[in-house]
Image (cartoon, rainbow, N blue to C red):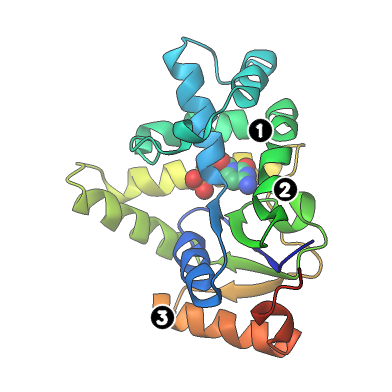
Amino acid sequence: MSGPVIAVDGPSAAGKGTLARALAAALGLPYLDTGLLYRAVARKLQEEGGDPTAAEAAADAARRLQPADLARDDLRAASMDRAASQVAALGEVRAALLGFQRDFAARAGAVLDGRDIGTVIFPEATLKLFVTASPEERALRRWRERVARGEPVTLAAVAADLAERDARDAARAAAPLRPAADAVVIDTTHLDAPAALAAAMAIAARRLGGSQLLTSPA
Ligand code: DC
């Protein structure tokens, strides 16, 4: 490993993307939102008329993924949530995306957020954080985001979608969502983004003495 690798895992809408991005900026590390990989595979399949539960076609789409596929601006749409979580349940798709994630961090290290970064992609990560929040708070945050985008959606519908996706992500056989044994849990239920970043930086300093994070041996 040429630089520090920080794994930030956790369920949807717990604040892990915001935290991971801020940590990467604070530490000068590249950042990868690995959920985008699964969303891009689902989008590609959808465009090609493929079924997000058909393993071979989905794995083939994953193998053909190009950097430009990740730059699309429609991947985060709520309409992609279900298909992304369906392709993410397929071991063949996960295997096809492994190399991309490891290569991303190979040169300078990285902060990666996802569900299995600390358990499967980087079991030897320098630091593993598991970011969570209560289901009620997560549903509220996601609902506010969607209402702010002008989407007419009820809190109950958002809560039901989140619960369905969390259950699929946690129950699947391939790399289920769970904290790594050596992950430090950050519960953001009562933390705003700056407070979550401060908590993560304090954990990093405590666990690693700062030095491993702030220097990247060649
Ligand atoms: O974080 P997100 O909502 O963009 O992720 C989209 C889907 O992909 C979600 O169902 C979880 C899944 N995912 C995964 O299984 N492993 C990852 N490393 C990242 C996301």
Q: Distance between the residues labelled 2 and 3?
A: 29 Å
Mark-to-mark CA distance, 1 and 2: 19 Å
Asked if residue 78 lies left or right of residue 1, the reply is left
- Front-lying residue, 112 or 139: 112
Q: In this view, does 58 lie to the left or right of 178?
A: left
Which residue type carries mark 3?
A: Pro
Task: Classify the position of ligand 1 by quadrant: top left, top right, bottom left or bottom right.
Answer: top right
Q: Which of marks 1 and 2 is nearer the N terminus?
A: 1
- Report helix, strand or loop for mark 3: helix
Residue pushed farthest left? 150
Check mark 1 vs ligand 1: CB closer than 8 Å? yes or no: yes
The residue where tag 1 is placed is: 89
Of callouts 3 and 1, the N-terminal one: 1
Task: Report crowding for label 2: few under 14, some 14 to 19, many 20 or more residues within 10 A (C-alpha).
Answer: some
Whether disc 2's CB lies below 8 Å from ligand 1 is answered: no
Quadrant containing the C terminus is bottom right
- Residue placed at 73% from the left, 69% from the top? 183
Residues tagged 1 and 2 counted as in contact (Cβ below 8 A): no
- Left or right: where does residue 54 sit relative to residue 99? left
Mark on residue 102? 2
Judge whether residue 165 can be spotted in this image: no
The answer to whether residue 203 is visible is yes
Position of residue 168 measured from the top left corner of the image (x, y, whole percent): 61, 39
In the rendered image, which quarter is residue 141 located in?
Answer: bottom left
Q: Mark 3 points at which residue?
A: 194
Proximity of marks 3 and 1: CB atoms separated by less than 8 Å: no
| 192, 202: nearer the viewer | 202
Q: Residue 49 at what x, y percent from top left?
A: 46, 9
Tag 1: amino acid: Ala
